[in-house]
Image (cartoon, helix red, strand yellow):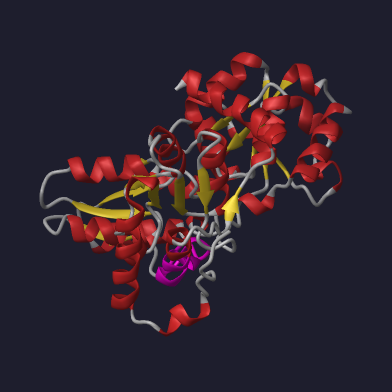
Amino acid sequence: MNEAAPVSLEPLYALSDEQLQARIAQAKAQLGERCVILGHHYQREEVYRFADLSGDSLKLSRLASQRTAAQYIVFCGVHFMAEVADILSAPEQTVILPDLAAGCSMADMADLVQVQQAWQALNQVVDGDRLITPLTYVNSTADLKAFCGDHGGSVCTSSNAEKMLQWAFAQREKVLFFPDQHLGRNSSHRLGVPLEEMVLWQQHLPNGGLSAEDIRRARVILWDGYCSVHTMFQPAHVALFRQRVPGIQVIVHPECSFEVCQLADARGSTEQIQERVRAAPSGSKWAIGTELNLVNRLKREMPDKEIHFLCPTVCLCSTMFRIDLAHLCWVMENLQQGHVLNRIRVPEREAAAARVALQRMLSVV
């Protein structure tokens, strides 16, 4: 039994950033290799600087699972990312999310009941288990990954969505893609699937708002979900930068709308955007359509390049922004005293099925 009382969160908000940083650094040093801190690319800068590993969600989960000495994995990201880390980590490792309110609005747009109902409705029109491969974006809950594992489907990321769609089509002739319609549409189109062979399943309408003929002719059934950050970027923003900054190159995330992706010079995941801009020559000009914290980090890193945020308004991942210095300090100091707070634990049966779906992806890419 721990003798020291748990550290309270509320008093930490009275401290300055410098005081919080000093206390986090002290707790981190004392925990040593027993604790690894993961920082997603969209994380606020003052928290991101404490990350032992940085990257996108799947990369971080895989790297953390390789830190066998790490008893604690503190994930500075959002809930679904911490779930993936728990699924892929060793049983003796504990995953912690500093603020349980750090969720993902896109992931919340598809829940297991809705997907099960959609699957049943689709099966009334076509033989889904024989004709449809379910494919979920990694930005989804663990139970939806488990659903894909149970129904012969898999998972994809923004960097491998095209490869996984090719895999899915090799299994069956149709794909149910959720929760992000834009990633599904953009990736399918790049594979040569015409827009007229894609339909949008609107989960709050009877039969998704589709007729039986719509479902029969569709090759891709897209879920009506989206990223609230990336849908802020508009075609007018691309036109504005091309007019104002001669020679500028526009690169966007594939969660942006089809129209924006078609107008951009390039598109890619957070990792791919960074690689492309870093490899560009000094003096090159870029307008980047992804989360603000990442764009600002690239601007600081490469002052020899002209880097702009594509959207004229502030556009950041507000749910991930909930993880602040106070929450990181809170969970770290409690770990220091032996108190494990905000543990993320996926039930084993669900984790096993989700692991099947993830392993299908990892075997392809």
Q: Looking at this view, is 67 or 336 the one in front?
A: 336
Q: Position of residue 163 (x, y in %)?
A: 48, 24
Q: Give the residue at x 27% y 59%.
A: 297
Which stretch appears magenta?
314-330
Residue 225 at least partly seen: yes
Can you say whether 270 is above or below 43 in the image? above
Residue 131 is covered by the magenta coloring: no
Going by the image, does 1 lie left or right of 327? Answer: right
Give the quarter of the figure containing the N terminus: bottom right
Can you say whether 47 is above or below 120 in the image? below
Q: Give the residue at x 78% y 25%.
A: 216
Going by the image, does 73 lie left or right of 238? Answer: right
How many labels, in total?
0
Give the quarter of the figure containing the C terminus: top left
Residue 192 at least partly seen: no
Residue extending furthest bottom? 14
Going by the image, does 328 lie left or right of 81? Answer: left
Q: Give the residue at x 64% y 41%.
A: 142
Going by the image, does 26 lie left or right of 38? Answer: left
Q: Quadrant of residue 12?
A: bottom left
Q: Looking at this view, is 169 or 33 the one in front?
A: 33
Residue 324 is covered by the magenta coloring: yes
Q: Looking at this view, is 234 or 330 the one in front?
A: 330
Q: Position of residue 30 (x, y in %)?
A: 32, 57
Can you say whether 44 is above or below 250 in the image? below
Residue extending furthest right? 124
Q: Position of residue 312 (x, y in %)?
A: 38, 69
Q: Looking at this view, is 250 or 87 the one in front?
A: 87
Q: Position of residue 139 (x, y in %)?
A: 56, 45
